[in-house]
Image: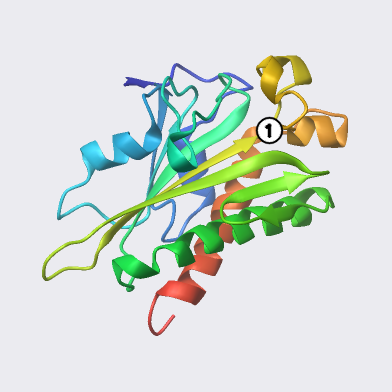
Amino acid sequence: MFPARGYDADRLVADELQADLDATLIGREIVVLEQAGSTNDTILQLANTNSKEGLVVFAEYQTAGRGQRGNRWESTASKGLWFSILLRPEIDVASSPRLTTWAAEAISDAIQREFSLAPAIKLPNDVQIDGRKVAGVLVEMRARKKAAHLAIAGIGVNVNQSCGDFPTDLQNKAISLAMALGKQVNRQKFAIALLRNLDRTYRARFLRGA
């Protein structure tokens, strides 16, 4: 794994993301990597008993991104949002599908709010526009004795790809926000909006007394 290079207009900047997410739980610490195998695996490597809930790891490119049932997730470099969130939800492991539902709904809602598009959720973990996949969720949960269970919510959003950026077999199944809108999207701005929505809805659903 490699830290992301210096500032570029089309790159995510961890310090700026974190500054715009002041006082949130999700996004209290943000890491942006140039490359990772998968951000879920990176979170697992970094996590320990003292790791703070809300850590977010982005990768500009994933060499081994994955979705449900072991499917490969195509993550074109610097054209999407590929990230994972470290969570300690107050639920049991058997309830982990609730996290998948939460994340998919939060992504769909953020897309609708920011771009006035009409995404739909294809259960259990896909977000679609016009019947084509624009985002997906992969939640992995680990039981912990005498502590809140550890969960990693992996999220991929197709943002600025053109049709040709997808493999031939996916070109009629996948879509990006840019393709749906007919224009490029500011990834940094949308990342902030998405993390804020994930934070707000996570607090409401999974934190007692929130």
Name above or below for residue 117 compared with residue 23. Answer: above
Give the amino acid type for the residue marked by disc 1 in the picture. Val
Query: Image quadrant for the C terminus?
Result: bottom left
Of residues 94 and 101, the one drawn nearer to the viewer in this rendering: 94
Query: Image quadrant for the N terminus?
Result: top left
Q: How many marks?
A: 1
Q: Left or right: where does residue 124 sit relative to residue 96?
A: right
Question: Coloring scheme of the render?
Answer: rainbow
Of residues 157 and 52, the one drawn nearer to the viewer in this rendering: 157
Name above or below for residue 164 compared with residue 136. Answer: above
Identify the residue shown where x is 48% and y is 22%: 61
Q: Which residue is mark 1?
A: 159
Image quarter of residue 12: top right
Q: Left or right: where does residue 42 sit relative to residue 48?
A: right
Give the residue furthest to the bottom. 209
Give x and y (percent) for residue 57: 39, 38
Circle 1 packing at 10 Å, graded few (<14), some (14-19), many (20+), is many
Of residues 132 and 30, the one drawn nearer to the viewer in this rendering: 132
Give x and y (percent) for residue 110: 68, 55
Of residues 22 and 94, the one drawn nearer to the viewer in this rendering: 94
Image quarter of residue 43: top left
Give x and y (percent) for residue 22: 47, 56
Give x and y (percent) for residue 104: 59, 56
Give the residue furthest to the right. 182
Mark 1 lies on a secondary structure that is loop
Identify the residue shown where x is 50% and y is 58%: 100
Identify the residue shown where x is 47% and y is 39%: 83
Image quarter of residue 162: top right
Give the residue furthest to the left. 146
